[in-house]
């Protein structure tokens, strides 16, 4: 009987599928790229959000600081009238602190010295008969600014940004290194901003009539003078267009009411036209 020899089983080695291995490698690389990209995007978003929050906080802190400036009861009454009228005119709640800060800057300037305007405008009968001048002027301007300040509409935001761009840019530079901002640059920024806002309020016939066409230039000078004189205190409040616009609106409203109702403007306004910021 012959001996049977059982042939050993030979295992065929498993050869990996090169296509699948490549796919796995690609998947790992893609996952890594996605993870890295997400990390970079998240970090960038955090930096941007942090910068925005920091800028907003700078503005908020500056506004609160300006609001705390002390003025006498007569001048505080101007501030209170501006605040009350703006609220009655349904100006955005977010703008109220900024407007109060602007009104305080204007009131402080008037308290430090004012001069009489030779000839005023013509008040509407209601304002005169009801001894309603300060409130009436403020309400008229509040209605105008209410459609502009802190509004979501693209047109309002575009107007705000355009009107405040010179002052916002200068305020940012001033905070970074005020010694680099010369008198000419500061004066120009304040002049352009004042001119932009006077043109805005000139669209309201009652306000224009109360100011008087002959007083348009001196009002513009008074606004620019007040802004330039206040730059040390208020630069932080002017680094964001919306905040800057509301602060300027507070200055404008208070000075317009003072010109229309009391026929006075802060000392230095007359000289601003010739000397500008170099005369401060």
Image: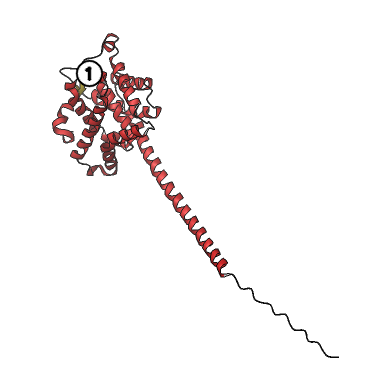
The residue furthest top is 129
For the point 54% across and 64% down, which residue is it? 23
For the point 21% across and 23% down, which residue is it? 265
Identify which residue, 153 or 82, lies in the foreground.
153
Image coords of residue 74 (percent x, y): 28, 18
Residue 237 at least partly seen: no
Q: Residues within 10 Å of mark 1 (few under 14, many from 20)?
A: some
Quarter occupied by the C terminus: top left
Q: Quadrant of residue 70?
A: top left
Mark 1 sits on what residue? Answer: 209
Image coords of residue 80 (percent x, y): 34, 20
Image coords of residue 28 (percent x, y): 53, 61
Quarter occupied by the N terminus: bottom right
Tell me the element at label 1.
Answer: helix
Identify which residue, 196 or 4, lies in the foreground.
4
For the point 31% across and 20% down, which residue is it? 140
The residue furthest bottom is 1
Identify which residue, 213 or 136, lies in the foreground.
213
Image coords of residue 182 (percent x, y): 20, 41
Q: Quadrant of residue 267?
A: top left
């Amino acid at each position: 009987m012959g001996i049977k020899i059982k042939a050993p089983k030979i295992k065929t080695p498993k050869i990996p599928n090169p296509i699948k291995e490549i796919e796995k490698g690609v998947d790992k690389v893609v996952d890594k790229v996605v993870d890295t990209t997400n990390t970079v995007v998240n970090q960038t978003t955090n930096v941007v959000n942090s910068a925005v929050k920091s800028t907003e906080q700078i503005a908020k802190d500056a506004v609160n600081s300006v609001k705390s400036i002390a003025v006498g009861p007569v001048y505080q009454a101007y501030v209170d009238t501006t605040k009350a009228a703006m609220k009655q005119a349904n100006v955005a709640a977010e703008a109220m602190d900024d407007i109060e800060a602007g009104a305080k800057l204007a009131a402080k300037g008037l308290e430090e010295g004012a001069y009489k305007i030779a000839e005023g405008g013509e008040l509407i009968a209601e304002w005169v008969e009801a001894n309603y001048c300060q409130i009436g002027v403020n309400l008229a301007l509040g209605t105008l600014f209410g459609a502009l300040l802190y509004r979501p509409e693209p047109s309002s935001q575009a107007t705000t940004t355009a009107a405040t761009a010179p002052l916002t840019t200068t305020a940012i530079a001033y905070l970074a290194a005020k010694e680099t901002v010369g008198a000419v640059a500061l004066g120009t920024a304040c002049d352009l901003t004042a001119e932009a806002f006077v043109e805005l309020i000139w669209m309201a016939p009652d306000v224009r009539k109360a100011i008087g066409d002959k007083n348009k230039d001196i009002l513009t000078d008074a606004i620019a003078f007040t802004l330039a004189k206040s730059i040390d205190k208020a630069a932080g409040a002017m680094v964001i267009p919306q905040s800057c616009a509301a602060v300027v609106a507070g200055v404008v409203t208070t000075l317009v009411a003072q010109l229309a109702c009391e026929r006075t403007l802060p000392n230095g306004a007359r000289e601003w036209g010739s000397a500008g910021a170099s005369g401060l």
